[in-house]
Amino acid sequence: MTEADAFADVANLPGVADAVAEARAAVDRLLGHRILRRRSAEVSTESALRGARASAALEGASVTLDELRTTENPGDPIVQGALRVSAELGTLSETWRQAPRQALARLHVLAAADAVDSADLGRPRTGDQPVTDVFKVGTTPSPSEVAGRLDALSGLLTRPTKAPALVVAAIVHGELLTLQPFGWGDGIVARAAQRLTLVSRGLDPKSLTAPEVGHAELADDYATSLRAYASGTPEGVATWLRHCSAATAAAARDSLAICEALLRG
């Protein structure tokens, strides 16, 4: 990922443009719902809660929406981390645009506060730190490779691109889960970074959709598509981009259902 517009290059892979267009259409249908003219904040809040639950579930935590609504302090550190990340995501959009590495560090502090030593919070892992490979991605990149690829990703994120927001968001998500830069909580961070990208690049500026929900709905495909991305082949990257598009479309449909429920009262 060293080209001037690497994001645009991967956007041209087979099947990606059509998948992105379908996801964009689903998001546009959501954004056109009449309830959003006066109650968009409620949809965003519910979406954030559903996103936190889905992200925690993908990491292996078992928690229901009712439990999140009725339990003041769920004990699982994964659930706590996902909730903290979801709650603060809206404040990080500008930081994400200007200083992605700083935003990632903050996301990890939020995600892992109950799970790792305070000295390791927000810091890329060193050689002796264990890695929790939830999705069996495979060989873990070395700390030096992690540092180089994070620098490359951050550089790309702060330069203009012709690629759709969804493509950029998918690459961010895939890179972070492949690199596993922190060793614990990387999935929560990666999914949050995807959502931040969709917000900051204008696809979903009010954060009405929760891509995490779509990934959880397509959980089997999520893991296999991620491993395909990690292979580094054009076919594997395209598979991942198509999956992320499908997950975003599923998330938009879920948020549309929230809108309909509010409309019915």
Image (spheres, helix red, strand yellow):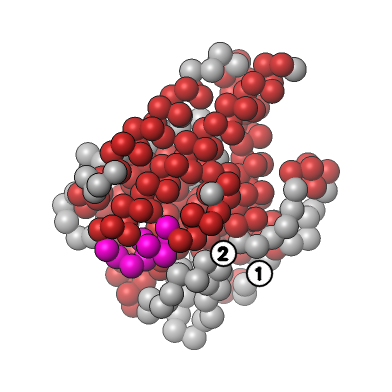
Nearer the observer, 11 or 154: 11
Residue 184, position as x, y percentages in the image: 56, 69
Which residue is under mark 1?
115
Nearer the observer, 227 or 49: 227
> Residue 24 appears in which quarter of the rendering?
top left
Residue 74, position as x, y percentages in the image: 78, 55
Judge whether 188 appears above or below 159 on screen: below
Closer to viewer: mark 1 or mark 2: 2
Nearer the observer, 211 or 48: 211
Q: Is residue 174 magenta?
A: no
Q: Secondary structure at mark 1?
A: loop
Nearer the observer, 121 or 176: 176
- Identify the residue at horizontal 62%, vertical 27% (top origin): 257
Question: Who comes first in sequence, dot 1 or dot 2?
Answer: 1
Distance, label 1 to label 2, CA atoms, is 9 Å
- Identify the residue at horizontal 31%, vertical 52% (top origin): 238
Which residue is under mark 2?
185
Q: Is residue 172 left or right of residue 152?
A: right
Q: Amino acid at mark 1?
A: Ala
Q: Are marks 1 and 2 in contact (CB under 8 Å)?
A: yes
Q: Amino acid at mark 2?
A: Gly
- Identify the residue at horizontal 65%, vertical 42% (top origin): 50
Q: Is residue 232 magenta?
A: yes
- Identify the residue at horizontal 58%, vertical 31% (top origin): 255
Residue 241, position as x, y percentages in the image: 36, 49
Q: Is residue 240 left or right of residue 120?
A: left
* Extent of the magenta region: 225-233
Neighbours of disc 1 within 10 Å: few (<14), some (14-19), many (20+): some
Q: Is residue 106 left or right of residue 72?
A: left
